[in-house]
Image: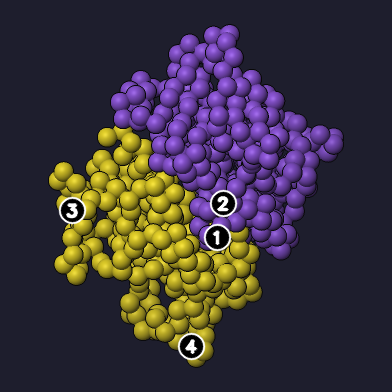
Chain colours: A purple, B yellow
C-alpha cells in the first residue's frame, strides 16, 4: 500500500503531525526509534506547556501517546535508514522493512551536543542540564557554570543572572564565539558573570547532586564550586538519513519555508527541532507538526 | 510603573505569551475583554490539541487560566481602546485606566464573520459551525451546506466529501471567488458536491438541531434539507485599536516577521489568529505566544 503521509519521529512534532493527519482523514504511519524525543529525558517538570501547570516530560509524552493510540493511528518503533524519492517516497528501515508514501514529514528532532566527559551522564537531572529556560529558576542564589562561549552560552548567563548568585561562562577556545554585542553587554552590566577562556572542563563532580567541576586552564588545574552545569555547545539535528533531499543551514538544521514547513523537495516537510526555526520548545514543535500536516493535506489535494 | 511586556488578549496565544514572559522573569500584564477567545464558543470537543485526547474548549481554557493564576501572573479583564508609542507604549483601556510598557504582544484573535441571519445564533453548536476541521467527522453520511464560495468554502466541501453524504456550496454572488483550480477539481472529481451561485441564505431552520436552510435563488424561494451549516465567509481580526502601528494584509490580518512575529513597529509583536499566519489552530496560537515572548525577551535584552 502507498500511504498518504509517513511521519518520521515520535516526539511532540511527530505525534502532533499524526493527530492532524488523522483528523484530515489521511492514510498515515508514524515511524520512530522511540517515543518522546528530548521530552523524556527532561530533568525537571515542564511548566510552560499550555494546559498543564506542571508535568513531567515523561507524563506529557504519555498523554500524547495515549491520544495517538485512542485515535487508532498507526505507528512503528523502528529507525529509518534511508529515503529516496521516485514516483513516491521510498523509506527503508533498520529492520529491512520498506514503505512508500506520497508525503513525508520529518520530525526527528535534535540532540544537545554532549561534552562527553566524566560525570555528565551521571548528574543529568541532578545539576547537569541542557536547557536553561527549563531549569533556570531552580538555581536561585546558587553558583552555576555554563559551558560554551557562543551566543547561547552568553544568553543563558544573562538569563541566569536573575536567579543565580554567580555565573561562570566557560569556553575552551581562545575567543568567545558570541556576538561582540552580547559580550559587551555582559561585561558592562552583569557583574555576577565571570567569563573564562581556554578552559577545558575535564569532569563534573558531586554526590547526590553536582558539587563542582574540574577544569584545565592553560594547562593548570582549576576547580570551581558550582551546583549547576549548563551545557550550551549546540545541538545536533538528526538528518543523516535524508541524503540530498534537503538543504541544511550552518547549524545542520533543515531549511524550510517558514509558513508551510516544506523543504526544497516537494512533498517533504520538516517540523520541530530538526528544522531551522529558532525557538526550540515543545509547544512550537507541536504547532509545527500541526502546520506541516495541514500543508501536507493541501499538497495532496493539489496533486 | 513601566511593564516589560503588556499582552493584549486572553485566548490561547495571550495566555501562552504570559506563561513564557513570566518564565523569562519579565514584568508582565495581560489585558483582555474576557478569557478564552474563540475556544470558549467551540461547538464540539477539541480532539487535536496535543496532550488531551478530547476536551471541551471551555475546560481547556480553564486549565490554561489555572496555569496563569498558579504562577501569579497579573491580568486584567478590560478592553484596550488605544495604543500609542512614545518612549514607551501607552495603552488606554475602556475603563479609562492607562498603562505603559516596553513591549506589546497583540493576541486579540479574530472572529468568524457571521451571516447575521435568523437561526444562526440559535443553532450554533447544534448544526451551525464556523470550523470544518473541528466538526467534520460529526456529519458522516449527512447532508451539509457550506455558505461561502471562496477557497475556504471549496476546501471545506472537499474535506467534507470524506464524511458527508451530500454537500452544497452556496455563494451569494454571480461567481465563485475560489481559485479556478479549486473549482475545476471539485467539478471533476467530487460528485457529492453541488455548487449554487446567486443564492442568498435567508434563515436556518430546525428544532433541537438544524433541519434545513431557506434561501432565495434568483428571487425564487429554495429550501434545502441539511443537518449541518458551515459558514465560511472569512474572519475579522480584532485590530481596531492599533491605528497605524501595524500593516495589514487583504484579510485584515497583521503582517509579522515569520520567525520573530514582530510587526513593523519595533517592540510590537502579534501572535495567534490576529496575525497573517495561515493555519488557525489552538496549538499554533499557543506556539505563536511562546515565540513572541521569546523574541520580546531578546528585544528587551538588546536595548
Label 2 marks a residue whose chain is A
State the separation of the CA atoms marked 4 and 1.
39 Å
Q: State if disc 1 and disc 4 touch (CB < 8 Å).
A: no
Q: State if disc 2 and disc 1 touch (CB < 8 Å).
A: yes
Q: Earlier in the sequence, mark 3 or mark 4?
A: 3
Task: Work out whether residue B100 or residue B17 is closer to the camera in this orientation and state it.
Answer: B100
Q: Where does label 4 land, which residue?
A: B206
The kind of secondary structure element at disc 4 is: strand
Q: Where does label 3 land, which residue?
A: B90
**Classed neighbour count for the residue bearing mark 4: other residues with Cα under 10 Å, few (<14), some (14–19), many (≥20):** some
Callout in the foreground (2, 3): 2
The kind of secondary structure element at disc 1 is: loop
Could you tell me residue B115's position as x and y percent?
35, 74
Q: Where does label 2 land, which residue?
A: A46
State the separation of the CA atoms marked 1 and 3.
33 Å
Could you tell me residue B14's position as x and y percent?
38, 57
Could you tell me if residue B172 is visible in this image? Answer: no
State the separation of the CA atoms marked 3 and 4.
49 Å
Q: Where does label 1 land, which residue?
A: A52
Say which residue appears at 35% left-offset and 30% top-offset.
Answer: A190
Amino acid at each position: 500500500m502507498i500511504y498518504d503521509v509517513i511521519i518520521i519521529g515520535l516526539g511532540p512534532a511527530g505525534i502532533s503531525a499524526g493527530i492532524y493527519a488523522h483528523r484530515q482523514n489521511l492514510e498515515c504511519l508514524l515511524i520512530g526509534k522511540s517515543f518522546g524525543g528530548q521530552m523524556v529525558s527532561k530533568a525537571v517538570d515542564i511548566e510552560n506547556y499550555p494546559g498543564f501547570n506542571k508535568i513531567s516530560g515523561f507524563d506529557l509524552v504519555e498523554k500524547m501517546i495515549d491520544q495517538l493510540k485512542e485515535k487508532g493511528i498507526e505507528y512503528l518503533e523502528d529507525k529509518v535508514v534511508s529515503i529516496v524519492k521516485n514516483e513516491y517516497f521510498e523509506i527503508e528501515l533498520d529492520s529491512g522493512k520498506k514503505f512508500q508514501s506520497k508525503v513525508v514529514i520529518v520530525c526527528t528532532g535534535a540532540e544537545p551536543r554532549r561534552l562527553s566527559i566524566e560525570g555528565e551522564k551521571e548528574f543529568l537531572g541532578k545539576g547537569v542540564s541542557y536547557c536553561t529556560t527549563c531549569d533556570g529558576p531552580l538555581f536561585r542564589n546558587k553558583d552555576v557554570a555554563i559551558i560554551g562561549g557562543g551566543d547561547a552560552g552568553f544568553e543563558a548567563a544573562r538569563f541566569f543572572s536573575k536567579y543565580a548568585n554567580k555565573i561562570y561562562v566557560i569556553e575552551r577556545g581562545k575567543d568567545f564565539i558570541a556576538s561582540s554585542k552580547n559580550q559587551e553587554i555582559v561585561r558592562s552590566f552583569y557583574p555576577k558573570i565571570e567569563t573564562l577562556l581556554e578552559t577545558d572542563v575535564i569532569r563534573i563532580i558531586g554526590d547526590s547532586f553536582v558539587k563542582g567541576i574540574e577544569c584545565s586552564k592553560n594547562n593548570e588545574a582549576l576547580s570551581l564550586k558550582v551546583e549547576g552545569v549548563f551545557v550550551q555547545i549546540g545541538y545536533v539535528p538528526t538528518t543523516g538519513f535524508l541524503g540530498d533531499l534537503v538543504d541544511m543551514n550552518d547549524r545542520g538544521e533543515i531549511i524550510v519555508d517558514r509558513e508551510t514547513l516544506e523543504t526544497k523537495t516537494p512533498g517533504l516537510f520538516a517540523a520541530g527541532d530538526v528544522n531551522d526555526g529558532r525557538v526550540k520548545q515543545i509547544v512550537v514543535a507541536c504547532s509545527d507538526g500541526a502546520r506541516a500536516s495541514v500543508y501536507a493535506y493541501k499538497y495532496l489535494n493539489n496533486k
